[in-house]
């Protein structure tokens, strides 16, 4: 994979980090080469950030450190930016699990995420090998985006303290267009979508939709993977984890992204003492409406067959056990200031979310459907997509009614005089042909209508789309996807 392909492809990474990386390598790709020696001399240290091999510690517990931006291979990208080669990481994990000296593996991850290329494969490797020997993820700083994708595949996930950042589940892609450079390139293409999002011209509406479709698909793959690894449903992941937010410390536990607090050292001790405790994947537990005495019960989520055990957070030379659950009444009584602050923040967050929902609903308005939009705005649940579908259906119904009314009001046709026998025969043939086509199975009928009507071919993208619409109308379901005017 070329460096340019890697930088312009979709990423699962914190957006600020992606912009920083793109700025460095855009300069590099323009021909302003990165002076590695000068950077090393200024820093007083080498830039090389080679991925470390796993280290075996007490009790046969191996520790593999995965630090920095994730990318498929180790190259100039990793040397300047530092990072994790997903290919090398997979090799190290496979080697550790095959090593007879190793009884368990700790993945010590500190990463903002990275390229989507190679990440699903790394996660799949972790999940497969975790069934052979216990694998646990521990982060002491950042576990975001692609890093969380991979880390969530372990049998359990822990963070070292209350300031560790977790989440940012989402996908980001960018399109760059330099109008000064575009004049020097003329592209000649074949195939409608071959260069629909070309960087030699501004992004069209169709190009934006094309790229958005790619990002949406990758996002759904990401969400499905997390749901599978955390033992829950994609709907639960979307509702609790995957809106792109970063969760900090206890928030990550309450939202089911991690299973508790533990440092790398304390996890090594626990695995050395009893590796079987982490031999099976743990399921996510969600907290609804803040911390509760039984987050899983309040969220309606089935708890794991291996219930999460309290995990110690090692501080200095002492080990302190922390209670990670507290009901609303206890929080309000013991920490009134914190309770008031959280209540204010939740109200503000709720107001912001509701305002955004209402704005999204309003953006779907079409003249003549103001009353429908007003109803959807204040029902407290309809999204912008729901509103768009409802308005589209209402508009189709309105147009059908208007068409029927216009037909009813139209002047009756003037009776025609008798025509030549040839014309009457032609009319009879046309009627017979129409009756024959209508009697065909739906696929054959649609094909015949598609081939016979230029109007139908102009209205729909393909025969398959037209056939799908006819079937949907027969079953009472309206479908407009596939229409060129949609």
Image (tube, rainbow, N blue to C red):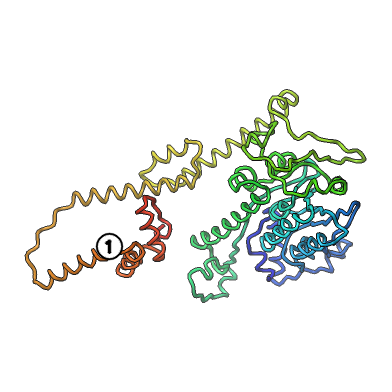
Q: In which quadrant of the rendered view does residue 324 lie? A: top right
Left or right relative to 231: residue 359: left
User: Where's residue 103, x and y in %?
Assistant: 84, 54
Report the residue at 20% width, 49% height from top.
408
User: Where's residue 431, x and y in %?
Assistant: 20, 65
Using the image as rendered, state which of residue 351 and residue 220 is in the foreground: 220
Label 1 SS: helix
Whether 381 is drawn above or below 209: the answer is above
Within-10-Å neighbours for mark 1: few <14, some 14–19, many 20+? few
User: Where's residue 115, x and y in %?
Assistant: 68, 61
Numbered-mark total:
1
- The N terminus: image quadrant: bottom right
Q: In which quadrant of the rendered view does residue 352 lie? A: top right
Left or right relative to 371: residue 39: right
Furthest-top residue in this view: 333
Report the residue at 30% width, 67% height from top.
453
- The C terminus: image quadrant: bottom left
Furthest-left residue in this view: 418
Furthest-right residue in this view: 317
Using the image as rendered, state which of residue 332 and residue 227 is in the foreground: 227
Q: In which quadrant of the rendered view does residue 72 lie? A: bottom right
| Residue under numbered circle 1 | 439
Report the residue at 83% width, 45% height from top.
263
User: Where's residue 196, x and y in %?
Assistant: 52, 67
Left or right relative to 467: residue 127: right
Whether 75 is drawn above or below 342: the answer is below
């Amino acid at each position: 994979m070329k460096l340019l392909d890697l930088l312009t492809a979709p990423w699962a990474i914190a957006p600020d980090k992606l912009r920083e990386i793109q700025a460095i390598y855009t300069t590099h790709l323009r021909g302003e080469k990165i002076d590695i020696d000068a950077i090393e001399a200024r820093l007083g240290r080498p830039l090389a950030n080679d991925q470390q091999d796993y280290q075996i510690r007490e009790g046969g517990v191996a520790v593999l450190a995965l630090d920095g931006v994730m990318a498929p291979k180790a190259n100039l990208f990793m040397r300047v930016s530092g990072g994790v080669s997903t290919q090398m990481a997979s090799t190290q994990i496979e080697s550790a699990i095959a090593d007879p000296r190793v009884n368990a593996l700790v993945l010590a991850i500190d990463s903002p995420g990275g390229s989507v290329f190679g990440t699903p494969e790394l996660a799949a490797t972790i999940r497969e090998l975790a069934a052979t020997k216990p694998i646990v993820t521990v982060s002491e700083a950042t576990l975001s985006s692609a890093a969380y994708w991979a880390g969530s595949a372990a049998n359990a996930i822990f963070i070292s303290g209350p300031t560790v950042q977790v989440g940012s589940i989402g996908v980001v892609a960018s399109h760059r267009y330099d109008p000064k450079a575009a004049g020097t390139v003329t592209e000649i293409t074949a195939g409608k979508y071959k260069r629909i999002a070309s960087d030699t011209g501004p992004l069209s509406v169709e190009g934006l939709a094309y790229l958005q479709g790619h990002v949406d698909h990758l996002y759904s793959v990401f969400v499905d993977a997390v749901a599978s690894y955390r033992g829950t449903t994609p709907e639960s992941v979307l509702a609790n984890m995957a809106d792109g937010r970063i969760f900090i410390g206890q928030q990550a536990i309450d939202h089911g992204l991690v299973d508790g607090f533990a440092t790398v050292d304390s996890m090594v001790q626990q695995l050395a003492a009893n590796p079987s405790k982490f031999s099976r994947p743990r399921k996510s537990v969600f907290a609804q409406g803040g911390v509760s005495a039984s987050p899983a019960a309040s969220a309606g989520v089935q708890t794991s067959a291996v219930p999460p055990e309290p995990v110690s957070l090692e501080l200095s030379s002492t080990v302190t056990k922390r209670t990670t659950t507290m009901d609303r009444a206890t929080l309000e009584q013991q920490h009134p200031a914190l309770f008031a602050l959280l209540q204010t923040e939740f109200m503000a967050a709720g107001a912001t979310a509701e305002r955004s929902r209402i704005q999204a609903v309003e953006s779907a308005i079409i003249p003549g459907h103001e009353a429908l939009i007003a109803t959807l705005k204040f029902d407290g649940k309809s999204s912008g997509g729901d509103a768009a579908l409802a308005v589209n259906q209402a508009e189709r119904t309105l147009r059908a009614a208007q068409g029927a009314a216009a037909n009813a009001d139209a002047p009756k046709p003037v009776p025609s005089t008798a025509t030549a026998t040839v014309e009457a025969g032609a009319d009879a043939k046309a009627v017979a042909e129409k009756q024959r086509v209508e009697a065909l199975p739906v696929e054959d009928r649609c094909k015949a209508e598609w081939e016979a009507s230029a109007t139908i071919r102009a209205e729909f993208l393909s025969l398959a789309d037209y056939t799908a619409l006819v079937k949907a109308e027969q079953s009472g379901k309206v479908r407009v996807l596939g229409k060129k005017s949609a």
